[in-house]
Image (tube, grey):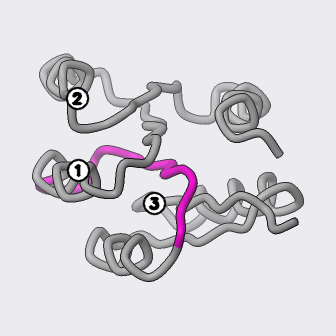
Amino acid sequence: MSKPTILVLDDEIPRIDILTKKLGDDFKIFSTADLDKALEILQKNKIDLLLTEITFPDFDKWLAKVALFNIPVYIVTETSDSKILNTLKKSALVQACFLKKYNNLDYIIAKIKEKIKT
């Protein structure tokens, strides 16, 4: 049986590397720091979950495109911008789970495994 697939999208490569290393045993990982590349990955592959940061320019518009793929979106962020967070939480476009960034990496992994049974 093939591993579930996760797309990791973050603007900082070291964070992508950390997540890829931690998740790689249980999941097939695609990763990028570019929104357009992420859409291309989504179009060409069956992705079971998107794990993303939200600090990209025009993230909300990009997220509307992602909603067409009907996949769970786990947003991992340190932002305290309540406007951004409230907009995303109210959005019917995504199945979102908001997680504090890297304060507890094991918690993030547990939430992913809970959503996608490995």
Q: Is residue 41 left or right of residue 5?
A: left
Left-right relation of 24 to 95: right
Residue type indicated by callout 1: Leu
Specify which label sits upstream in the sequence, 3 or 1: 3
* Mark 3 vs mark 1, CA separation in Å: 12 Å
Q: Position of residue 110 (x, y in %)?
A: 76, 29
Magenta-tinted stretch: 46-58
- Quarter of the image holding residue 107? top right
Q: CA distance from mark 3 to mark 2?
A: 17 Å
**Does 23 lie within the magenta span?**
no
Which three-letter amino acid code belongs to the residue tagged 2? Leu
Q: Which residue is denoted by mark 3 in the rendering?
A: 9
SS state under label 3: strand
SS at mark 2? helix
Image quadrant where residue 56 sits: bottom left
Q: Is residue 15 above or below residue 108?
A: below
Q: Which mark is residue 88?
A: 2
- Residue that sits furthest to the front in the current view: 1
The quarter in which the N terminus is drawn is bottom right
- Residue type pointed to by label 3: Leu
Q: Secondary structure at mark 1?
A: helix
- Label 2 Cα neighbours within 10 Å, binned few <14 / some 14-19 / many ≥20: some
